[in-house]
Amino acid sequence: HDFVIIAVDGGAASGKSSTSRLVAERLNLMHVDTGSHYRAVTYALMLDGVPSTDENAVAERLQTLPLDTVVEGGSARIALGGGIPTAEQLRSEAVNNAVSLYAAVPAVRQFLFDYQRFQAELARVNGFAGLIMEGRDIGSVIFPDATLRVFLEADSATRAQRRAAEGENDAIEARDKIDSSRKTAPLTCPEGAFRIDNSSLSLDQVVDLIESRVKNCE
Ligand code: C5P
């Protein structure tokens, strides 16, 4: 492969972000966290008082929502009209509690589909060797044609520890439940994906596994 695409899916606190960042660094891939896309859209819609229950209003507001991308270091960040939303804005309790509700709205997923597919072009023109994208439906919906699709999971004790470290407790359980049971693009391990339980593996071990699997794909 002259251009590699790695899709990484998994639930909240499954270790997707730290794993994806390190793989990106080692293989010179552009890293994209699609959770931040859903968080940014949620933040913008809530700021405008558009409820997730009103799909028409959501679809209408999205038509005029300007999306942009800023490539910084090894990551591509989503920018809205006012620039890159801050971590405080994207990870507030209000957004934690509402993001899965907005992410279940088909118009929201439709809106982000082209944007996320386009990230591969951005990675190319920015000189990366490929793209690693993390989320819930990357291997199933966004890049079913990826070079490698990874599904990360961990046992409940390990997830509980990570949840505590991330300081988000109830919302994580609730989000996983909504994300797994929604009709459009539910969180699931896509068939043929490389399933890794990272409960008793170090970050480096997980990254080594992914790296050697990618090399086998080439
Ligand atoms: O990855 P993170 O926990 O930041 O994602 C926040 C939320 O965004 C998820 O709980 C899910 O509702 C939504 N999401 C999604 N599809 C993706 C990535 C995130 O529905 N590909």
Image (cartoon, rainbow, N blue to C red):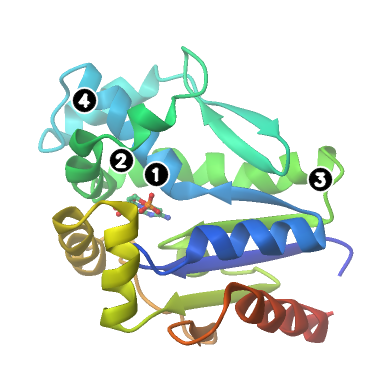
Residue at image mark 2: 107
Which residue is located at x 40 percent, y 69 percent?
Answer: 14
Residue at image mark 3: 124
Front disc: 4 or 2: 4
Report how far apart the C-alphas of labels 4 and 2 lie in the structure.
15 Å
Residue at image mark 4: 46
Mark positioned earlier in the residue sequence (1 or 4) = 4
Disc 3 CB within 8 Å of nearest ligand 1 atom: no
Q: Secondary structure at mark 3?
A: helix
Q: Secondary structure at mark 4?
A: helix
Mark 2: few, some, or many residues within 10 Å (few <14, many ≥20)? some
Disc 4 CB within 8 Å of nearest ligand 1 atom: no
Q: Which quadrant would residue 133 be assigned to in this image?
A: bottom right
Disc 1 CB within 8 Å of nearest ligand 1 atom: no
Mark positioned earlier in the residue sequence (4 or 2) = 4
Q: In the picture shown, does residue 94 fall above or below 191? A: above
Examine the rendering and report whether any part of residue 111 can be seen: yes
Examine the rendering and report whether any part of residue 142 can be seen: no
Report the amino acid beneath label 4: Met
Q: In the picture shown, does residue 2 fall above or below 194? A: above
Relative image position of residue 30 (x, y in whole percent): 71, 49
